[in-house]
Image: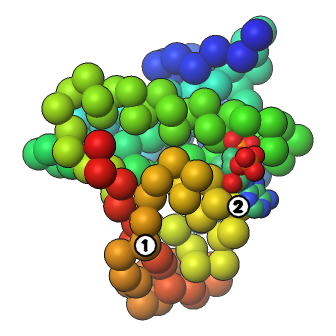
Amino acid sequence: MTVVRGMRYDDLDQITEIEKECFSLPWSKDSFERELQNDLAYYQCAEENGKIMGYMGMWRVLDECHVTNVAVLPEYRKMGIGSMLIEKMVEICKCSEIQAMTLEVRESNAPAIGLYEKYGFVSAGKRPRYYMKPVEDAIIMWKKI
Ligand SMILES: CC(C)(COP(=O)(O)OP(=O)(O)OC[C@H]1O[C@@H](n2cnc3c(N)ncnc32)[C@H](O)[C@@H]1OP(=O)(O)O)[C@@H](O)C(=O)NCCC(=O)NCCS
């Protein structure tokens, strides 16, 4: 059974492999170690029998949460794992008096935009040339909690 649970230090080798598979500028293991030491950061991963299939992170900034990353290994996509991760983060926000969630997404990233729209995120503008490798605009999305 797939469970969504808090990320731990002993997950980080698997997490950094997922980063490399999913992003052109992957975060390093050190970056994730710092995230796990940050009291304002929340990181959850989807795991089944020790295998980590995906993860999601966000930072609390006052009464908002800023999503930092969401990733699911290619072979486990379209199976509801991204949804499980978002549902867990929304639940955390609801329990923490958070008023809104926000994120940036590449404007060409239809799977991610579809996932966020499914959970009530709406587009609120663009950040021109926000991404590198390749250079691309970001869509800014918000969801009220
Ligand atoms: C975005 C991502 C996390 C989605 O994870 P997932 O586990 O496949 O998502 P789910 O199976 O829960 O799908 C949820 C919804 O997302 C949307 N979606 C997922 N894959 C899609 C695709 N290929 N095309 C269009 N919409 C898609 C659909 O609305 C879907 O709902 P539905 O199943 O009711 O149609 C995954 O594609 C991924 O890791 N991509 C690479 C990393 C990335 O781009 N992260 C986002 C950075 S901003």
Residue 123 bears which disc, if any? Answer: 1
Where is mark 2, residue-wise?
Answer: 111
Drawn side of residue 145 relative to residue 110, left or right: left
Residue 142 location in percent, x, y? 35, 61
Position of residue 18 relative to residue 22, above or below, is above
The residue at 56%/86% (across/down) is 136
Residue 7 location in percent, x, y? 49, 23
For label 2, the SS is helix
Residue 37 location in percent, x, y? 30, 28
| The residue at label 2 has a CB less than 8 Å from ligand 1 | yes
The residue at 62%/38% (across/down) is 83
Residue 25 location in percent, x, y? 59, 64
The mark tally for this picture is 2
Amino acid type of disc 1?
A: Ser
Q: Is residue 19 visible?
A: no
Amino acid type of disc 2?
A: Pro
Quick one: quadrant of the C terminus? Answer: top left
The residue at 28%/30% (across/down) is 94
The residue at 88%/41% (across/down) is 75
User: Looking at the image, is mark 2 or mark 1 nearer the viewer?
Assistant: 1
